[in-house]
Image: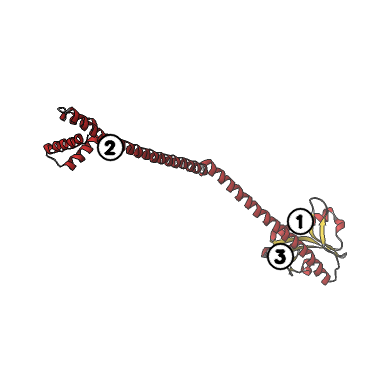
Amino acid sequence: MERREDHAKTAATSFYILLGVDVEELKTALRELARREPEFLIDLIADAASSRRDLALKLASVVAGVVAVPLDVATRRDLRRLERRMAKLEREVGDVKSRVERLEKEVKEIKNAMATKEDLKRIESIMATKEDIKRLEDKMATKEQFEALAISVEDSGREMVEYLLEQRGYRCAAERLRLDADYELDVYCNAGVLTAVGEAKVRAGGRDVERTVERIRELERRWPEKISGRLVPVLYSLVAEPSAVQKARELKVWLIESKREAVALEEALG
């Protein structure tokens, strides 16, 4: 048995020498050939050793061993490499799908967050409404402030008329005169021998003096019993324009501006 193996080694070495190449280089070449073209290598060696059946079988067995191992190793390695590539590809595909899903979600959120023309119109309408409400509130506040100021002016006017009459010896309690739903005067002070009747304004002009006189004449005509003694038309204002002073002198109206008499009581009485 050992003699046959020695003989086979000697024959293989002689075969390499005949080919004229280095043994190790030939082995490397054979391994590479066995990896790439195993069938071709087997046929080649089998043909070369056809003259010796026992040698052919031995070489075929050796070649088969040489070929089988690299092929088996290469195949498993390739399968593992392929499995790794497939796993990596699956991960990459999963990452891509996840990114696509996130992107779709972000796009959807952006679409939902984006304002349409209708949204803008609705916002403009709301803003316009808010501005209208704000202007209305401002007007309401102004109106309330004006009403409060007017009430304060009326109170100041009554107090001032009552005080100035008392300084001259005329005692009376100044009040508001209201006779019906349409007729009212801000100042009414009946001292018996003298009755001061009129209006109170924040700012008075010539036309305000004329309207005061017209209302007092209506009082004389409709409710003469409300007047005792001398009738004195009176107009109280915080600010009296020059036209008011001039008209008050013409129509004999007692004009009081804040805390001073722009047209004195005596001038109004004539």
| Label 1 crowd bin: few (<14), some (14–19), many (20+), radius 10 Å | few
Q: In this orientation, does residue 270 appear?
A: no
Considering depth in this image, is 157 or 214 the residue closer to the camera? 157
Residue 142 image position (x, y, % from top left)? 67, 57
Q: Is residue 210 left or right of residue 194?
A: left
Residue at 44 percent across and 42 percent down: it is 99
* Of pointers 3 and 1, the one earlier in the residue sequence: 1
Q: Which mark is residue 58?
A: none
**Picture quadrant of residue 178:** bottom right
Helix, strand or loop at label 3? It is: strand
Residue 229 image position (x, y, % from top left)? 86, 63
Helix, strand or loop at label 1? It is: helix
Kindly indicate whether the residue at mark 3 contacts the one at mark 2 (C-beta within 8 angstroms).
Answer: no
Q: Nearer the viewer, mark 2 or mark 3?
A: 2
Image quadrant in which the C terminus is located: bottom right
Q: Amino acid at mark 3?
A: Leu
| Distance from the alpha carbon under mark 2 to that under mark 3 | 118 Å
Q: Which mark is residue 214?
A: 1
Residue 74 image position (x, y, % from top left)? 30, 37
Eyeballing the image, is 172 above or below 31?
below
Q: Is residue 81 left or right of residue 168?
A: left
Q: Which residue is mark 2?
A: 70
